[in-house]
Image (cartoon, rainbow, N blue to C red):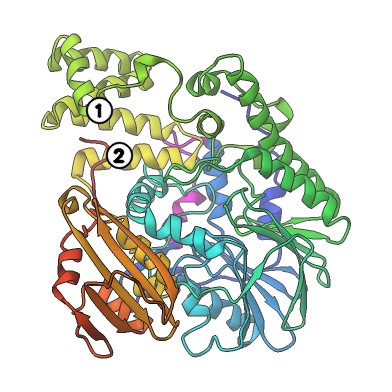
Amino acid sequence: MSALPSFEDTADFENADRGFLGALDPAVIKDAEGRVVYDNDAYAFLAEDCPATAHPSLWRQARLCARQGLYEVTDGIYQVRGLDLSNMTLVEGDRGVIVVDPLISAETAAAALALYREHRGDRRVTGLVYTHSHGDHFGGSRAVLPRGAEDGVPVLAPEGFLENAVSENVYAGNAMTRRAVLMYGDRLPKGPRGQLGAGLGMTVSTGAITLVPPTRSITRTGQEETVDGARIVFQLTPGTEAPAEMNFLFPDHRALCMAENATHTLHNILTLRGAVVRDARIWSRCLDEAIDFFGDAYDVAFASHHWPTWGRENVVRFLGEQRDLYAYLHDQTLRLLNDGLTGTEIAEELRLPPALERAWHARGYYGSVSHNVKAIYQRYMGWFDGNPAHLWEHPPAEQARRYVEIAGGTEQALAKARVYAADGDLRFAATLLDHIVFADPSHAEAAETLAGVYERLGHGCENATWRNFYLTAAGELRHGVNPAVLDTADPELTSALTVGMLLDSVAVRVDGPSAWDEDLTVDLVLTDERRRHRLTLRHGALTHRDYPLYHTSEIPAGLTLTLAKPQLLGVLAGGAPDADGVRTEGDPGLLARLFSHVTAADPGFPIVTP
């Protein structure tokens, strides 16, 4: 285990409290039906001393992240922190206020904006900026810009924002949301034995996810835009913490926004909920570029999570250490993989330089050296480690049955697992018990023993997301799956998607084998977009292409629907093709045939059991 930094260093606590103006009291946010979507008051227990069931370093981080309220960053720039996983930043312009990153849910965004207005006046929103394409930075946008209020209000985002937001939150949304239950631990009880936060913030809100589409793209570093009198200079950073991301400077405020590229934790190269593997090399280079590009034009740096850093010298040191952190992980992983080590072997061997280990902001509260190294290996080498024994292994349940058989059967394997657990080898105890559970899911004693091992592993974790995975898994073994409340198919999110994205989201839900023998074509004529989209279901694959409105094909479609995008949303949600505003030509039964092959994802699919 790496050496911890000094607990006598209180600079983070001083920075986290600096500029405090007022808190939400009570800090409990509910939706229109009265359901709690975020409760920061649940973390009051963190005022106590660190118990034996928590890592002291993680307890410290949780205390910092649990601070909530409105804070002044510098003259004219404010942040609401602690009302969601992420921060909302508010920049006062000539006529109103510019919102940067409107949190995850409409409910928490509304509460954050109301808290700001309580202390700074009822300024209207005159601009909206998304730092990057992750849901915790755009989901509350409709609370900031309600329908009818967005006219003439610029919405800025990095190039590729919408495409990447869709790929993470819609195409693979169900699987990512299911794994996010374990990663963020939002279904766990809050307390010394349960959820302590997520390292990046406390937890995710569970309200309505919305999306106001961008109206202005940032396409290059050095691009300058003026929003409500506020000048903004951008640095585009694609391929870093998100595929579409940007840092930016408010030169008149001498304030630098680092998005999520530099926070007070080692971040993820591959998040445990699942995503495209990030490029640690590019991430490091973009941080180095930021130091050079923004020069001495700032006195404070803030981000979309955690607390700001004041003083240019402090910021440069912070950014330099973050830069070296990702560069070191990248380069040393490549060095060792070129020596023939696998990702798992590198993760056991690699440790950070002592100077980085002693930096609180480089600790692994959200990402970890272990899983980041494996992600870097995956980015270059893929899932296969080169050992042919791993090329065509049995799936987990089949492999588990064979392991238990060679261990002498379930009872003998269980007895051996208990010995490993008693001897403190919790890692192998978990591996062996996992095989028993997958070989015999009905064996309650094995499930309970594994739950106890997961609980002990979780209580020892410095990394918040590892702790949440272990403890949520223990809860699922004992009580069954408690699916996420979060809905990635909310109409406020889907209405922001392009027609092509909507059709892609249907295509990834087609049950291919059931549609092997289908051969059908449907044309969608979008009157408000003046485009014709042709859908073809053949060989179990739903493909589509679009043409100008009056394009004709040698092969006529079996069904043509003429409609506007709002009607299309209803049709794709299962509405009748003859709904108001929809004109039908051809066989309307083709639509029913097509949708008979479209499946609904299971939001509670098993993870810790087969």
Residue in front for this viewpoint, 449 or 540:
540
- At label 1, counting other C-alpha atoms closer than 10 Å, the crowd grade (few under 14, some 14-19, many 20 or more) is few
Which residue, given by chain and number where applicable, does mark 2 sit on? 473
- At label 2, counting other C-alpha atoms closer than 10 Å, the crowd grade (few under 14, some 14-19, many 20 or more) is many
Residue at position x 61%, y 37% in the image: 363
Quarter residue 43 falls in: bottom left
Residue at position x 62%, y 63% in the image: 159
Q: Residue furthest left?
A: 442
User: Height in image: 436 above or below 522?
Assistant: above
SS under mark 2: helix
Highlighted range, magenta? 40-55
Residue at position x 51%, y 58% in the image: 164
In this rendering, position of residue 410 left or right of residue 237? left
User: Height in image: 560 above or below 260?
Assistant: below
Which residue, given by chain and number where applicable, does mark 1 sit on? 395
Residue 447: x %, y % from top left? 19, 31
Residue 542: x %, y % from top left? 29, 58
Asked whether residue 45 is drawn in magenta, I would say: yes
Q: Quadrant of the C terminus?
A: top left
